[in-house]
Image (cartoon, rainbow, N blue to C red):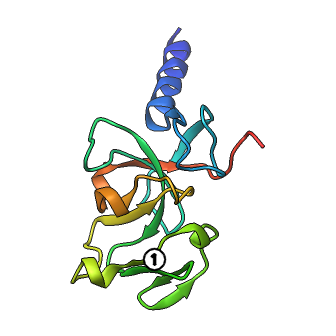
Amino acid sequence: MLCYFLFLGSFRMYYWLYPKYFVSGESMNPTYWEQEIVQVKAHHKPERFDVVVLHPPDAPTELYLKRVIGLPGERIDYQKGQLFVDGKFVADQFASTTEDFDWNSSNDQAIPKGYYFVLGDNRIISKDSRVFGLVSEKQILGIVQEGNTKK
């Protein structure tokens, strides 16, 4: 009986720590599709291009799925379909559909410690850091597994 409760407890704890979410909307197409299920796989500090589940700053009760582009201490620019981090080119597979964005024109300092710049993969329609600003580390619920199950 004790083994049953230990198993049930660990099973419930796993799904509490690594929850699953349904994708709603098209802002992460073609990586993730509407109604696809994604699961949190990690809770460490996100790295560039990790996909995260987050509470956006302007709607703290909602959940968004976005890709981390800018890390603390960096300046992000998109010019002519290319990503530049601190003035250096960085390959981004979705950069060609990203409108020009110059960090220096809207901010006089680098991304603060504990904050991230996030974008959706479907850059044309995505509501992301270009709209709601930077996301704090506390607003990030976890990193999800990359890739979709529907092709």
Front residue of 10 and 108: 108
Which of the 4 image quadrants contains residue 108? bottom left
Q: Is residue 33 left or right of residue 120?
A: right
Q: How many marks?
A: 1
Residue kind at label 1, given as amino acid type: Asp
Q: Is residue 38 left or right of residue 127?
A: right
Q: Residue furthest bottom?
A: 87
Q: Check disc 1 and report the residue beneath it.
A: 100
Q: Position of residue 71 (x, y in %)?
A: 39, 72
Question: Secondary structure beneath disc 1?
Answer: loop
Residue at 50%, 56% in the rendered image: 120
Q: Residue furthest top?
A: 1
Residue 140 higher or lower than 74, as above or below: above
Q: Position of residue 99 (x, y in %)?
A: 48, 71
Q: Name the quadrant of the C terminus.
A: top right
Q: Position of residue 109 (x, y in %)?
A: 23, 82
Residue at 32%, 48% in the rendered image: 56
